[in-house]
Image (cartoon, rainbow, N blue to C red):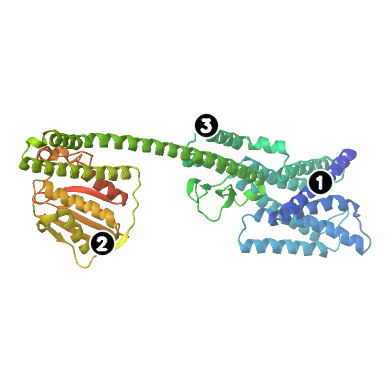
Amino acid sequence: MHALVTTVGIANTVFFVVLAALALRRWRRRRATAAGWLASAFLAIALISTFGRLVPQHPHGFGEYLAQRFDIELLVLFPYLLYRFATEFVRPGRRLQIAVASLTVGLSVWTFALPHLPASGEAWPGYFVAYVVFFFIHWAGLSVVVSTRLWRAGSRLPSVAANRMRMLSFAAAALTIALLSVVFAGNQSSVPALLSQVFALVAIAAFVLGTEPPQIVRVYWREPEQLRLQEAMRDLVTLATTRAEIAARVAAPASALVGARGLAIYGTDGELLAEHGTTGDGEGIQIEQAGVRFVAWTSPYAPFFGEDELRTLEVVAALTATALDRVRLFEYEHESRIALERANEVMTNFVALAAHELRTPVTTVHGFVQTLNHLGDRLGEDQKAELRIALEQQTLRMASLVEQLLDLSRLDADAIDVRPELLDLPARLRDVVAIAAGARADEVEIEVPEPTRVVVDPEILDHIVSNLVTNALRYGRSPVRVIASAANGNLRVAVEDSGPGVASEIEATLFDRFTRAGVARDRVAGTGLGLAIARAYALAHRGDLRYERADPNGARFVVELPSV
């Protein structure tokens, strides 16, 4: 039995040294405070296992006495150093920290103040019994705090981090049991002595798994999150077609990968693409790859226990950036194709419109010209004059139609440039009405407060108002009223007549191309394009044009344009 206990004890010493080396390497690599506390704790237990074997049980002289007390002091410090590691992530209250530190300092002073340590088989004096009881209360109390904190915090983390924290929690408890077993061991050949060494060996294995778990163990622990992440990354290639959809598919598994309570994904332009869970609470961990930024609001334990997962999240961010770039190229190609199709449609519609609308005046002009050429010598002067007037009217109609068709083609192709200028609104409306109404300008009343200045595109305003005034005089009855006002950054111009109003059967299609009322179609010449063009100009200016019934009768057209 003695040989077995000795063999296991020597193995434990070797493993404690290896554990201390692993913790020191981790601290040198990260230089984090938590890693420093953990390395200090493992270094203390390694020194106890190695140099503590060289300390005599019955010291002679000051040097041996000091070495013995220093060995015990390391036992006192180990649980405190482990406690400082566990509380580095979420610190307890200041009073509790001061209390624990004071108890540790008091026990340390008591250790060096002990006058005598009883030998094996020697009766324990009362002061030594009190010291041992206080020592185990201190050790067990701090170990319980460490185990409880790490175990509870691990329940809210992903698999790898949770298992690592639970291993450390279990190791702290196992080492406490090992230390308690030493008290009941009696001698090195007893079963309690063997159990103490076995518990210490189990604790070392758990400490190793919690500090530096082998890669194969990490892969096994990470399998649930890895499967979800693989499915999400596969969907990026096969299913996601928009930037928002890509980000939405990645957000949940990426958040689960690092155990974040919330995760947000931002695009290259800083636009929020997707978010999952509770975001914006405090400062999150930021990972940026190729312009795509992940912000994860994780547990404070995550950077220490989930460093591999955070590196994996960097890879996920890079793959997401690639997928977003692919979608951006797809969207660009799609928009280019839509633009080409629209340009082709615009061209086709323009040709069809031109052919359809120009056929009648061209045929009329052609007929008049043939009559003049072939029958001119048979016609009287009055008849020739009548033909020339008709020719002039038809050519004017063609010129107006061509101008309208050109306006439509530019509006369809989004080729209208909006250039706002500061205008004196009353003066501008008087000029527009004078040109549009011509000899009938006295039939138009203008109501606009003086002075009123607006910032709008003058050409667009002229196009719309002149069209509405012309329509009111052509299809309605005088008087025609032009009422304008500017407020809250918007210009509102209403043109209303005193006629019968728009026929109810065409109200729904009033702004469609070639829409004209039946009576007006027979009575007045026109193309049915004016209102469609006027509304298109209003929309190009980020405004709108709508129809309302006037009170008590008549038609009212209201145009609203932003004045900036």
Closer to viewer: mark 2 or mark 3:
2
Determine whether 485 is above or below 254 in the image: below
Query: In the rendered structure, which amino acid carries the disc numbered 1?
Result: Val
Closer to viewer: mark 1 or mark 3:
3
Check residue 238 in the rendering and tell me which mark sits there, or answer none: 3
Query: In the rendered structure, which amino acid carries the disc numbered 2?
Result: Ala
Q: Residues within 10 Å of mark 2 (few under 14, many from 20)?
A: few
Check residue 488 in the rendering and tell me which mark sits there, or answer none: none
State which tag comes first along the sequence, 1 or 3: 1
Q: Which residue is mark 2?
A: 487
Camera-nearest residue between 189 and 492: 492
The reply to whether residue 59 is in sight is yes
Disc 2/disc 1 C-alpha distance (Å): 79 Å
Determine whether 302 is above or below 450 in the image: above
The reply to whether residue 136 is in sight is no
Determine whether 447 is above or below 23 in the image: below
Q: Is residue 268 left or right of residue 531?
A: right
> Tag 1's secondary structure?
helix
The image quarter in which residue 80 lies: bottom right
Residue 56 on image: x %, y %? 91, 54
* Residue at x-position 12% and y-position 44%: 389
Determine whether 454 is above or below 49 in the image: below
Residue placed furthest toward the front:
377
* Residue at x-position 73% and y-position 61%: 104
Q: Which residue is mark 1?
A: 18
